[in-house]
Image (cartoon, rainbow, N blue to C red):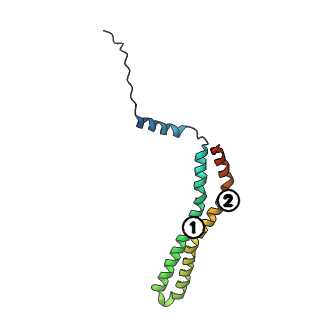
Amino acid sequence: MDDNKETFSYTYSAVEQEEIKKIRQKYLPEESDKMAQLRKLDRNVTRKGMAVSISVGLVGALLLGLGMCCTMVWADSLFVPGIIVGIIGIGAVSAAYPLYTHITKREREKIAPEIIRLTDELMK
């Protein structure tokens, strides 16, 4: 009897291949993918404005709540200061969106040459 049998077995799984590719990608050196760089730059433009406007809006909402609390709970002693604090809070909440648009516009102007350069390279 001959124990030298030649056999061929082949299994293919698209799911396994995708998983292998993902794991392999983690260990390969990062290439400077221009499209990924463009997406990252575009995403970062709004990040600073968003953080500042959310912070200002949050502080404004808290001040408005504190002012309301002062006028309703401690009306005998803190009515006028509560109104002043509430008005400051309303102003801060009202300023949050214009602040966002101003910061975002400034960041876009700063990053515009790099975005234009990358898009020119990608469109060629």
Question: Picture quarter containing residue 84?
Answer: bottom right
Q: Residue furthest top?
A: 1
Residue in view at x 51 percent, y 81 percent:
67
Residue bearing mark 1: 53
**2 or 1: tag closer to the N-terminus:** 1
Residue in view at x 57 percent, y 69 percent:
97
- The tally of labels here is 2
Can residue 41 be spotted in the picture?
A: yes
Q: Position of residue 105 (x, y in %)?
A: 64, 62
Q: Under tag 2, what secondary structure?
A: helix
Can residue 73 be spotted in the picture?
A: no
Neighbourhood count class around disc 1 (C-alpha, 10 Å): few under 14, some 14–19, many 20 upward: many
- For the N terminus, the image quarter is top left
Which numbered circle lies on residue 122?
A: none
Residue bearing mark 2: 109
Neighbourhood count class around disc 2 (C-alpha, 10 Å): few under 14, some 14–19, many 20 upward: few
Question: In the image, what residue type sits under mark 1?
Answer: Ser
Q: Position of residue 12 (x, y in %)?
A: 40, 31
Relative to the observer, which residue lies in front, 73 or 43? Answer: 43
Q: Under tag 1, what secondary structure?
A: helix
Residue in view at x 61 percent, y 68 percent:
99
Q: Residue furthest left?
A: 1
Question: In the image, what residue type sits under mark 2?
Answer: Glu
Q: Position of residue 10 (x, y in %)?
A: 39, 26
Residue in view at x 57 percent, y 79 percent:
88
Q: Position of residue 93 (x, y in %)?
A: 55, 73
